Amino acid sequence: MKNIAKIIDHTNIKPGVTEDDIKKTCQEAKEQGFRGVCVNPQWVKLVKQELEGADIKVVVLIDPPMGVSPHQIRVDQCQKAKEDGADEIDIVMNIIDLKYKKHNEVFNNLKEITSILPTKVIIGTGYLTDEEVKKASELVKAAGAFCVKTSTERDPLDSLELKEKAKHLRIMKDSAPNLVIKAAGNIRSLKDVEMMVEAGAGIIGTSSGVSIVEQAKKT
């Protein structure tokens, strides 16, 4: 794949990372030319500083793994991330509300979030039936997000086989054809990326971006 780095959000959302770890992640992103750097909220200011002058997006992860924090806390986190320099929000949909079919509540809450910054909504496909993946994708589109995302690397149930994840990507694409699709979780090799892109992914979230780019250079 050509320019594979340009579709990768280089991700460091592990608990216990240090300032030096985040600086290294940013340096790798600049060296490889990744699309973005995705971090937890406390690191947004530092990432903004480290990426100054680079054409790399600062992406903040909000409310993993199930999106069940009170709505106002989620809004406040997104507003703070914007003030700190985030370019995009990756926020988890309230998966419990979705499963209880509280669709209006899910929509209204996401609508407020998408008014703050360009938003990717994580629907947590590891928790969902195929029909719920479809409905979640439709809600994301209706709420004004630009992207629907499978899951995160911090999702304890995201142990799906990649073939199953690819199936979900196709459902997401069919349900919200105008949205960008982001695949994340357990994507560690060039072969994995190729499978996700073939299924419809336009963005890849992974902490293995450097290794994947190196693999691509050898093909």
Image: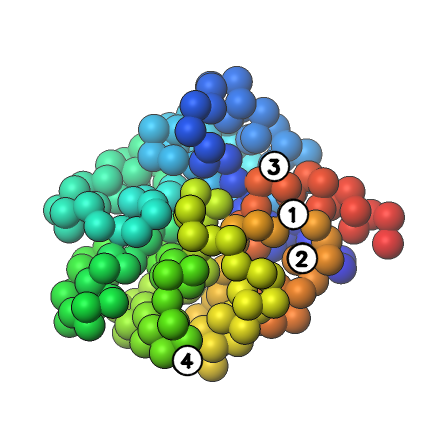
If the image is split into quadrants, where does the N terminus sit?
Answer: bottom right
**Closer to the camera: disc 2 or disc 3?**
2
Q: Gap between marks 3 and 4, in whole Å? A: 32 Å
Q: Gap between marks 1 and 4, in whole Å? A: 27 Å
Q: Secondary structure at mark 2?
A: helix
Residue 81 position, x and y percent, is 30, 38
Q: Secondary structure at mark 4?
A: helix
Q: Amino acid at mark 3?
A: Ala
Residue under the image location 25 percent in, 67 percent down: 99
Q: Secondary structure at mark 3?
A: helix
Residue 26 position, x and y percent, is 56, 31
Q: Is residue 128 above or below residue 191?
A: below
Q: Amino acid at mark 2?
A: Asp
- Read off the residue under disc 2: 192
Q: Gap between marks 3 and 1, in whole Å? A: 16 Å
- Read off the residue under disc 4: 175
- Read off the residue under disc 1: 188
